[in-house]
Structures are given as C-alpha cells and as structure tokens.
Image: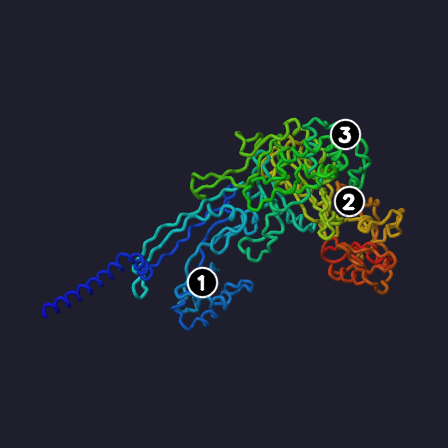
Amino acid sequence: MRRLRVIYVVALFAVWAGLIGFRLVWLQVFRHHEFVERAAKQQQRTFEVAPRRGMLYDRNLHELAMTVLADSIYAVPSEIGDARPATAAALAKIVHVDATDSFTAAQQILARFNASRNFAWVARKQDPEIINKVKALNLKGVYVQKEFKRFYPDNQMASEVLGYVGLDDNGLGGLEQNFDEDLHGTPGRMLTALDARRHVLGSEESEPLPGENLVLTLDANIQFMAEQALDRNMERTHAENGTIVVQDPHTGQILALAIRPTFNPNDFRHATTDLLRDLAVSNVYEPGSTFKPVTYAAALEEKAITPDTIVDCGGGQMNVAGHTVHDAPGDHFGLVPAWKALAVSSNVCAIRVGQRVGQDRLYKYIRAFGFGERTGIELPAETRGLLEPLKRWGPASMGAIPMGQEIAVTPVQIVTMVSTIANGGTYVPPHILLKSTDLMKDDPKLKPAAFHPESSLPDPLPEGAHRVVSEMTAAQMRKMMEDVVLIGTAHEAVHLNGYSAAGKTGTAQKIDPHTHTYSKTKFVASFVGFAPVNNPAITMAIVMDSPDHSMHFGAQASAPVFQGLAQQILEYLGVPHDQEMKSQAELAKNQVPVVEDDHPEQGDADLNSLFATVNDLPADDPLRAPQQTPGQVAPVAKEAAPTQVAASAAEPVQHSASPTTAFAETVSPKPLETPAPAPPMPASAPLAPIVNGSVIVNAGRRVAVPSLVGEPVRNVVEQAGSIGLGVQVLGTGIAREQAPAAGTMVPTGTEIVVRFTR
C-alpha cells in the first residue's frame, strides 16, 4: 500500500514536471520570437532618421533648392495627463497662425493627443519666433526637435520647374516630384534602449544617406531676366497667363522657363491648383501662324516650292471644303513669292503651300518636328499635344492645319521646332536636367557648366535626335524668318542692336467654352524667334494667353518681349555682334513705342468693328459705324478725356465665324476722336432668350444701350442683362469705352462691347 502511494506521488510529480517542461518549451522555443519582440517594444525604441534631401543647382551651381534645419513641436500625451484639452488650447493660440491650416487647430491637436500615448505632433517646421513662444509656456510633456525643411532661396523663381515638397519631404510637383526617389535619400535608423521608467540607457545609430544633387540646364541669371520681362509684359497686356521658354538650339538645353502667374514653393499651400501647373509642358494651345514654318519647311524640303515660288494669296480669302478662310485685316495680296507670303503671314498662302505638299507628307514632317508626342523633357505631367491621326483628318483639315489650327501644342514643343530650323535642321529633344551627382557645391570635383553658345551639334547626337530637313532647307527658312523681322509682321517690334534676328508672329483664336466655336475676343498671341540668324545662340518662345484686345496680335503682345529679352541675353552671354551697332537715336527712329499705361492706343473703329463682328451685322446695317469723313468719329462712348483727332482711320477687323478662320498680324490701329455724350437710357426691356450659351437677338424689340463707362465688370453685366443685352468683356477693371454709344437703339439680345482697364 505504501509502495502504491509512492508510485502515485512519483507519477504526479512526473506529470507536473512534464507539464512544466512542455510549457517552458512552448514559451521559450515556439513563442520565442513573439516574446523577444514584445520585450523589444518595452525596452527599445527605433526611430527613423530622415536623410538630407538633395540640392537643386542651376548650371553655374547657384542653389535653387536646399535643405535646412527647422524646429518642430511634439508632445508625449501620457505625460500631459488630464491637462490635454488645456494644453492643446494653449498651444493652438501660438501655432495656429494660419486660418486655412487645420493641422494646428486646437481640435486637431487634441484629437492627436487622444489618439496616441507616446507621441503626437503639435506643429512642424516652425519659425524661431513661434518656437520661442512655445518654450516660454514651459508646458509639461511638450518638446521640440530638429527636422529637415525644404527651402527655396529665390522664392518664386523657376517654381514650376523646381516644384515643391510636403511636410514629410515628399516631392509633390516639378523636378521635386519627378526625381523624388533620387533626391530623397535613404533614411537612417536609431535604436534606443529604455529602462522601466522610460529613461534612455543607450542607443545605436545607422547614418542616413543623403539624396542625389541635381544640376539643371537653367541659368539663374537668364531665368531672372525672363521672369522680369514676363512680369512687365503681363502688366502691359493684362493677359490671363504668359510663358517664356529660352533654349540652346544646338543641345536642346532649356536656359530659362518663366511662367506667370506663379507661386512661392516656400508657401505652396496657399496656391491654387492652376498656379501649380507647369503651363510650358502641360498646357496646349493652337499655335496659329507660329506653326507656318513647319508647312513652309516641308514644302521646301519636298521641292514643292522655292523661296521665290509665286503663290496666289487670293486677295486675302479662299474657300476650303465650304469654309471661307480670311487673311487678317490690312493689305491683301494676290501673287507673291513664298518668302513674302510667310513674312506677311498670309493664311491663304500657307494653305496653298500645304496643299502643294499634300497631307501625307505634311503629317510626316509635323511628326518629325516633334508634334503629337511628348518631348521627354524631365518634367512631370507633360502632354503630347493634340494632333489627329492622318486617317481622321477631315475635308477641311488642309484648310486649317497648315496655318496652325486644328492642332494644339505646348510652348516647349514650339520652341524646339524653331530650334530645329535654327541649328540646321536636326531635331534635338529638349531637356532641363544637366546631371545628377553626389558631390556638393564646395567639392572641387564639381565644376560649374557655364553656358557658352556653340555653332555645331553635339557629337554623338543625344538619344531621340534626328534630321528633319536638310541644312539647305534650314538655311532658306532662317532667311525667310529673318524677312518676318525685317519687312514682315514683326518689323515694327523687333530691332536688335548689333544682332540679326529671325522669328514668326502668331495670333490664334481661342475656343469659346460656351459656344464651342472660335472666340471673337479671346486670343493667344505668340512669337518664336532666334538670334543671331546665321549662327543662332538662343531660341525663344513667348506665349501670352488672352491679352487685352487692344494688343491681341503676336506682334503687339509678344514680339516686343523678344526684342528686349534677346538683346539682354545675347549681351550677357557675350555673343559677338554680327551687325553694326546703332546709336540710340537711330534705334528710336525704327522702334515703335510699346504702350505701357492702362489706356492703350486702340481705335474707336476697332471697337465698333468688333461690335459688328460679334453680332454678325450685315455690311449695310445702320448699327455699323458710319462711313467717316475727316473729322467724323464712330459712335463709341469713352470715359471723359481730352479730345484728339486721329491721323488716320483704322481699318475695321472683319473675319468669318467659321472654324477655319485665323488671324495674321497687322500693326495696331490708331485712336479716333471721342464722341459727344450720349442721351440717357430709357426704361428696361424684357430679357432675350439664351440658347446653348448664346443670346438670341430679338429684332422686333429695341432698347437703348445704357451708359456703362465707369462701372466695374459685374455691374456692367448685370445692368446690360437686366434689359436683355449681352456683353463682350475686353480686359479687366473699370469700363472705359463701349460700343455702341449709350442711347443707341439696338434689338434685345445684342451683345455690346465694353473695354475695361485698371
């Protein structure tokens, strides 16, 4: 019996020991990793050490974007305890300086305190003044730590190219986004051991690897010149936006890319989506006459014409597939040599030249010049433009594409096309990245790459480069484009001192989003050119979107920018003069003054002709401006001003409303006299019906045009709309002129034309 008890006891202990052993094996073998991880979480903390983001340099190693240290505020909510609401409120009073920044609002700070026990951001990358105020509060559980912050020393300069970064140093636009992985670097790790009271016992750290530095093709000085020139021109023309691209024609390197309006990447949160877009690569427009060099170059290369081939301009109009195409108002031509047809920018002649080439061959050259596909420039969101496949060209396409309609391009595409002609006929893809390097500016191994104009193409040619036209064709085109400046549409605007220049003006109608037809008041005015002619150092494209109607031609809104900016850049680069220098007095004789004030010299006849065009008035309609004799004026109401008698009447602007109508460039009309005050306006009339966004004229009911001079845009639209009249708005600010004059009896639904200036 006793022996049996011993056996039971031994068996019990054996089972107990087995269970203990199994449990130990289960915990220390099978669940070993789980408990190691739990211990590590309790005893260690791993922190990610942010790397320093790479620098962005211009070609001369001027810093365009750099990384600096900034203080950020964080809290340990478990240390704050029950005082979290009061602490959040106290901190928000200091850090919440921007009403649009919800991150620093008291409610959001408190929400982060309640969501975590060990760590919560309060505000990141703050200015020293705010940091000092927070430290002065001496709040429990609130601390400050250093973080890297992206800084752009030149503020808004080249902001669309550079882009911007978010709070976590992630690239969100421009080169910062496109090369984010290269610029960001590799984060480091810090392993910290803690005791039971959360005190640091020691740490191990792996160093972060800084990001790559990018050297750009931009020259900060040329970029500054371009942005200054664009700022002045935006103020002069009141355009909605403007773009300037300056390129080296032999290498495709972009020397400057300026866009207005713009934003400051140091404060990008307050910029609208439209301001963040890079219009040079993501915005398309119909190039108008600046596309004509493609048509003429194709014809020369295919031996369809020579520069002296006689082309029939048809007296300024022709019919294509049932659509009437007009040349711009002014001198209309019959039989002229091809070089003159390009110089005067005849739409009819461009179409006839395109027809000689044929649509198959023309399409081949359009693609060869780089249109219809992305250029591959190192910028995000580049569009390929709009070019329909050949099989989708309609009967009217050959009446539009040769003169730059029914195709949409980007400013970078158009300047690269001009560079192809300037460099001798070889397409060289544009690029804005010079190189990527680990070296910093102070390293003697990293040398500046100052731009020195070359006279030959790189050998070997870069990837994607290809010959488009022969050197002979390119030389002929350079001479023909020089004639545009010497005797053509740009002869009054471009007069470089000591340098020859060539180019092409362009004026393209914009599509009206309401009617889906070409607008009669909104245009894209552009100029493309290069200098010097025989050995070009730079090419340039200037594109002004919707300038004031008084200067909507490319020769008025864009060519003067080339005149000043090209002269400045060529002198800065030390390009040798290829022409005799002129005195200031000689230059003044040739130079047409550029209107700088808010009252551009625009003829009353132009306003009246625009009124007639907008309302499609017949030639004998009594609402048209009457035929004038010396001393007579058209019925245009203007803001009170001293009366002046014009030297000569301006020719009215007349064009078809068909989709194949385009504008070439002419000189601006001269001002006419101010009319006598108009009689007062009678009682209002019922509103005219609106169909598909257009006001339908009711010829049976007539109302008196009210006096709108001196009123802001909104008041003008409301006042005219209340009596059934539409308004074509020209410019912004206060109404200065209107057509027809106040008191004129017009049918309801008529659109009156009002010019506004600031």
Disc 2 residue type (three-letter): Ser
Label 3 and label 1: CA atoms lie apart by 73 Å
Between 433 and 128, the one lying in front of the other is 433
Q: Quadrant of the N terminus?
A: bottom left
Work out whether residue 581 can be spotted. no
Q: Which residue is mark 1?
A: 121
Q: Quadrant of the C terminus?
A: bottom right
**Picture coordinates of residue 178, whole percent (x, y):** 52, 46
Q: Sequence-wise, which precedes: disc 2 or disc 1?
A: 1
Colour pattern: rainbow
Side (left or right) of 655 relative to 54: right
Label 2 and label 3: CA atoms lie apart by 28 Å
Q: Which residue is mark 2?
A: 658
Side (left or right) of 200 relative to 715: left
Between 695 and 439, the one lying in front of the other is 695
Between 642 and 655, the one lying in front of the other is 655
Q: Which residue is mark 3?
A: 337
Mark 1 Cα within 10 Å, few/some/many (few <14, many 20+)?
Answer: some
**Picture coordinates of residue 732, whole percent (x, y):** 71, 55
Disc 1 residue type (three-letter): Trp
> Residue 26 has which mark?
none
